[in-house]
Image (cartoon, grey):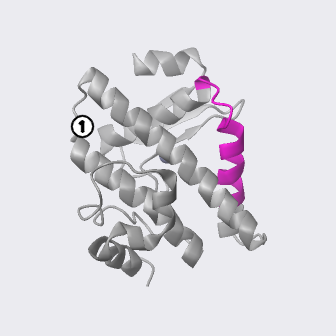
C-alpha cells in the first residue's frame, strides 16, 4: 500500500541493499522532477526508517502549509553546515523549522504504528526520536553532523514525544543521554 501510494505520486522507490546511503539510513526527495524515496535495507532499523520517511511523504502529499517553509529550513541549515554564513538568529530559525518538521513526522509515525499495529517497538522508537530531535541543538552548537549521533544515546531519553520547546535545551535530555551525545562531537 505504501509503495503503491509513492508510485502514484511519481516517486522512485529504492530499497538499497546497503547499510546506509552516503551515511544516511534513508531519505525522501520531493522536488520535481527527481522524486525519490530511498531506504537502506541493511540498516538494523530498516522498518522504522521506512516508516519515518513514509511519514515525510505524507507531510508532502497532504500539502501541509508548512512543508515548503520546513524545506527552506532544511536547505538553509545544510548550506550553513557546508560553510555558508548566516546571522545567528537565522540559523536558529532554520534549526527550529527542521525540529518542527521532524516532530510532526514522528507524531504521524506513532499514530500509524498504533492504528495499524505495525511491528515497531514504540517505546524504543520514541526514545530514538527524542534523541534525534534533541541532537539538532548539537548540530547547531558544533556546526556539524556526527555520524549516527542517536544510535546509542537513546536509552536515557524520554519515552513520550514532547512539545517543541522541550527539544531546545540540552539540559532537558537528562545528564546521561546528553553526556553520551556530547561525546559524539568531541
Ligand atoms: Zn526526518
Placement of 21 over or under 60, stated as above or below: below
The answer to whether residue 109 shows anywhere in this view is yes
Of 50 and 42, nearer the camera is: 50
Report the side of 11 relative to 178 (left or right).
right
| Quadrant the C terminus occupies | bottom left
Is residue 73 shown in magenta?
A: yes
Tell me the residue at 45%/79% (across/down).
Answer: 185
Placement of 22 over or under 1, stated as above or below: below
Tell me the residue at 49%/17% (across/down).
Answer: 5
The answer to whether residue 43 shows anywhere in this view is no
Of 94 and 84, nearer the camera is: 94
Placement of 175 over or under 31, stated as above or below: below
Of 83 and 173, nearer the camera is: 173
Number of numbered labels in the structure image: 1
Examine the image and state in which quarter residue 171 appears: bottom left
Residue 169 spot, x, y in % from top left? 48, 69
Q: Which residue is mark 1?
A: 120
Q: Residue furthest bottom?
A: 186
Report the side of 89 relative to 127 (left or right).
right
For ligand 1, tell me if the residue under mark 1 lies within 8 Å. no
Examine the image and state in which quarter residue 120 appears: top left
Residue 131 spot, x, y in % from top left? 37, 60
Q: Which residues are magenta?
A: 61-77
Residue 160 spot, x, y in % from top left? 31, 48
Q: Secondary structure at mark 1?
A: loop
Residue 4 spot, x, y in % from top left? 46, 15
Amino acid at each position: 500500500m505504501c509503495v503503491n501510494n509513492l508510485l502514484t505520486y511519481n516517486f522512485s522507490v529504492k530499497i538499497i541493499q546497503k547499510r546506509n546511503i552516503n551515511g544516511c539510513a534513508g531519505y525522501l526527495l520531493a522536488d520535481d522532477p527527481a522524486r525519490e524515496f530511498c531506504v537502506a535495507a541493511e540498516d538494523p532499523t530498516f522498518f522504522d526508517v521506512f516508516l519515518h520517511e513514509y511519514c515525510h511523504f505524507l507531510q508532502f502529499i497532504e500539502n501541509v502549509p508548512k512543508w515548503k517553509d520546513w524545506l527552506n529550513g532544511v536547505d538553509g541549515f545544510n548550506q550553513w553546515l557546508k560553510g555558508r554564513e548566516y546571522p545567528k538568529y537565522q540559523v536558529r530559525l532554520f534549526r527550529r523549522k527542521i525540529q518542527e518538521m521532524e516532530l510532526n513526522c514522528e507524531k504521524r509515525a506513532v499514530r500509524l504504528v498504533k492504528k495499524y499495529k505495525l511491528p515497531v517497538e514504540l517505546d524504543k522508537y520514541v526514545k530514538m526520536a527524542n534523541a534525534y530531535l534533541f541532537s539538532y541543538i548539537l548540530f547547531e552548537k558544533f556546526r556539524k553532523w556526527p555520524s549516527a549521533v542517536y544510535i546509542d544515546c537513546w536509552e536515557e531519553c524520554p519515552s513520550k514525544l514532547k512539545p517543541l520547546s522541550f527539544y531546545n535545551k540540552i539540559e532537558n535530555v537528562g545528564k546521561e543521554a546528553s553526556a553520551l551525545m556530547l561525546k559524539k562531537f568531541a
